[in-house]
Image (tube, grey):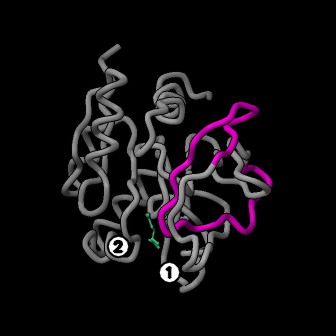
Amino acid sequence: MLPMKIGVLAVQGDFDAHRHRLEELGAEVVLVRCPEQLNEVDGLVIPGGESGAILRILGRQGVEKLKQFVRVKPAFGTCAGAILLAKEITHPEQEGLGALDVRIRRNAYGRQINSSIRQGKLGDSPMEMVFIRAPRFERLGPEVEVIATQGEDPVAVRQGKILAATFHPELSEDTRVHQAFLDLIGNGTL
Ligand code: GLN
């Protein structure tokens, strides 16, 4: 088998932290700056940043190309990336890629705690989680599985080969979520 190439969407946001983390885990990373580069990669990370800005920079054709990609290939979105993958986006409403059957509310934690480091759980194990103007999953479709929680909230979910987290695993030392994504690309399971 040819070695896997992982794309990191690099038009806006904290893409370099993802590149660093994936390379640390031994993956070959391509920074995807234009949609044509999606043809070369086996999976895609959509980073945190500002989801509205990412949509604007990609433009209509870029968004279409991305929609087609996430329909067939594995993708992992963090924060703004999770927002982009969702079917329904609120506060304000925004177009999405429609790959994940969830409703997600942008900037859901309000101003006081809009950024914080909290203890959550990946499955049953404790995990440090960095939240930055984080969204919240408000509805999960029947095929969506919760893989991490913080308090009562689901904060990382999976539907088939789509993974999404409302926190930023690329900003903690813990590599487990990125490793889970690489496993998902490699053998289709977590
Ligand atoms: N609030 C941002 C948005 O709506 C996401 C913040 C983040 O990615 N850290 O796109």
Quarter of the displayed picture in which ligand 1 can be seen: bottom left
Magenta run includes residue 133: yes
Magenta run includes residue 110: no
Please name the predominant secondary structure of the magenta segment in the image: strand
Residue 55 is marked as 2
- Horizontal and vertical percent position of residue 47: 38, 54
- Horizontal and vertical percent position of residue 74: 48, 41
- Horizontal and vertical percent position of residue 58: 27, 69
Cβ–Cβ below 8 Å for labels 2 and 1?
yes
Residue 120 is marked as none
Nearer-N-terminus badge (2/1):
2
Q: Residue at x 73, y 45 (%)?
A: 145
> Could you say which quadrant of the image residue 3 lies in?
top left
First to last magenta residue range: 119-144
Q: Is residue 115 left or right of residue 119?
A: left
Q: Quadrant of the N terminus?
A: top left
